Image: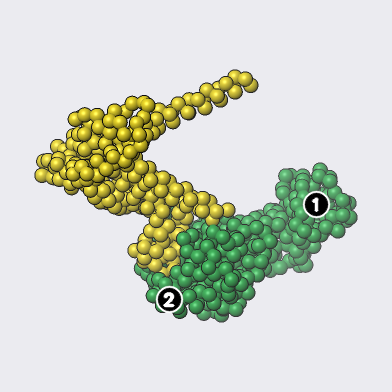
Amino acid sequence: MSRDRSLLWFLRLYLLAVFGFVFAPIVASLVFSFNSDRFPTIPLGSFTFKWYVQVWGNESMREAMLNSVIVAAVVSVASTFIGFCTAYTDYRYRFFGKNLYLGLALLPPTIPLVIMGLAMLAWLSRIGLSGHIWSVMIAHTVMCSPFAMAVIRLRLAQMDENLEPAAWNLGATEWGAMRHVVLPFTMPAIVAALCLTAAVSFDEFAVAWFVSGINKTVPVVILEILQGNVDPQINAIGTFVFMTSMTLIVFAQVLLLTRQKKQVGTNE
Amino acid sequence: MSEVLVEFDNAVKRFGSVEAVKRMNLEIYRGEFLALMGSSGCGKTTTLRMLAGLEKPTEGQVRLSGKEMNDVGAHERDTPMVWQSLALFPFLNARENVEFGLRMRGVKKAERSRRALEWLARMDIGDLAERDVAQLSGGQRQRVALARSLVTEPELLLLDEPLSALDANLVIRMQGVLTRLQRELGITFVYVTHSQSEAFAMANRIVIMNEGEIAQIGSPKEIYRTPSNRFVAQFVGRNNILTGEVTSQDGRSVSVRTELGEFNMPATAEASSLLGQSISFVVGADRVALNRQPRGSVNELSCQLISEEFIGSVVTLYLEAPDGTELKAQIQQRELDEINPEPGMSLWLSWEPSQTHILPH
């Protein structure tokens, strides 16, 4: 009994430590982004927005931000589309070589990012596409599609297998059933996939650093600033990027979880 | 009534090496309530899906009003189906679900809304039209599914075990709804089920299927009283099946010698013609009498009580003959009270010769 209790306390402490290690740097970054002192020291100086103002005034940062947003938007749409198609073919059809097809579709996240970045750079420069904003979009779409596929496949797994046949039975063509049944049913997962892939693309550094050339995204610019010197601007940018990603991911989670609950309701 | 609406002409459906439906020949008449009954995997649902165009026959044809349907897609047929899972669209409310078929046919918004509401009202759930389907009870969803299938006013409605998810009381209620609806609309219902009580309560004609083949077609009474083979006799249950040799006949009755003794049955032309042959015959469990002492009448055998099953005022007793043959007796509760048996007790089972039905070979 007392051993169980001490084990419980140990596990609780362990969990706390894990969260501590994960969030302490982020919280520190958040706190120092509002600190007037140039160096991150304690005691803190006074509260200030000046680093945010400075970032906003930084031309290369603004450009990178714009690039990141454009890339994230295009990538989320493209990879969600590809992810949906892959998930749907998996859900609906059986064909020769399906496991190979699925294996390939889900492969990208297992490849180390540095290798992926290098390979992308080599490949894209060979076909004359490196150093463009397109390059980042292509590379990120490859990386993000599996995430979209996984999220959408989960939703499709919850779909009554008779739902599509029921639509055909009521006079819907294959496309009609897709538009009026499959898409509405999958919509929460589609929106969640859009958010998740946008967040992944927005944060991704390694591959973007390899292929972006002069069209840098935010993470690439962050590295450049860091290489120069210790600059509290980084804290401001970091906080902003963190907030953006978290908002997207929390939104995606909420969307998926509330739908699941509702689904459970229909099955009672 | 006897006009043929649907015709299965040597229809075969194979999935890989599995023959789900073997050479189906079946005519379904306009306006009838036909039940396709069998245990799971007997091909009844595949038969229904061929009719809906969701499966294409591997061989043979399915005709609807005389027209060959093999190359007509599911969405081009007017053969709506009520699904076992109901397959209601969870992202649409009750009215929008009902409207779906009309929307796919390009009916204008105001018109389809009017017709959907009309059907929901007809199904007594007019006030729930704007509810999400998740907020409806099982019975209410059932009614939405029915309205959704009937809103296009088809000639034929297919039902695939629609009541199997409901609790017993609701099943009885919905049976009433379905029977009334079918009579009122005068359209053809093809009803797939594994439940005898549903099929027997509603259908005009029952098709019993076994391993992809039709085992018997007939009215509920025919299936129940005169099963045409051993499978049907067993499937319908509540039947005692005995096998023996026809040994003698004296003009009025025929005698059959079995492991359990000699039994008599009327000397019909059929029975008389089987002299010297081995036959199986059936005695309905509700046509036997049970006593604690032998009455000395013909067709009597001793057996042991194994267990009993109550269904309201009727009790089914499961018995075993000395050679291990399983026997059943269905008697009234008050008869049971008179006998007051206990498991393991010896009892005497007897029946009138006229209650015997010979299974054709």
Q: Nearer the viewer, mark 2 or mark 1?
A: 2
Q: Residue furthest top?
A: A3
Count of numbered labels shown in the rendering: 2
Q: Residue at x 22, y 44 (%)?
A: A57
What chain is colored green? Answer: B
Among numbered discs 2 and 1, the one appearing first in the sequence: 2
- Which is more toward the observer, B112 or B257? B112
Q: Residue at x 76, y 65 (%)?
A: B354
Residue B289 image position (x, y, % from top left): 82, 58
Where is the N terminus of chain B found, in terms of image quarters? bottom right
Type of colouring: by chain
What chain is colored yellow? Answer: A
Q: Can you tell which quarter of the image residue A173 is in? A: bottom left
Give the left or right position of residue B312, taking residue A268 as reference.
Answer: right
Give the left or right position of residue A94, taking residue B195 as reference.
Answer: left
> Residue B109, which numbered label?
2
Name the amino acid, label 2: Lys
Residue B182 image position (x, y, % from top left): 59, 74
To which residue does mark 1 refer? Answer: B301
Name the amino acid, label 1: Leu
* Chain of the residue under label 2: B
* Chain of the residue under label 1: B
Residue B317 image position (x, y, % from top left): 77, 52
Secondary structure of the residue carrying tag 1 is: strand
Instruction: Give the class, few, some or many, for how many residues have Cα within 10 Å of label 2's Cα (few <14, many ≥20).
Output: few
Q: Residue at x 70, y 57 (%)?
A: B238
- Which is more toward the observer, B39 or B153? B153
Residue B88 image position (x, y, % from top left): 50, 62
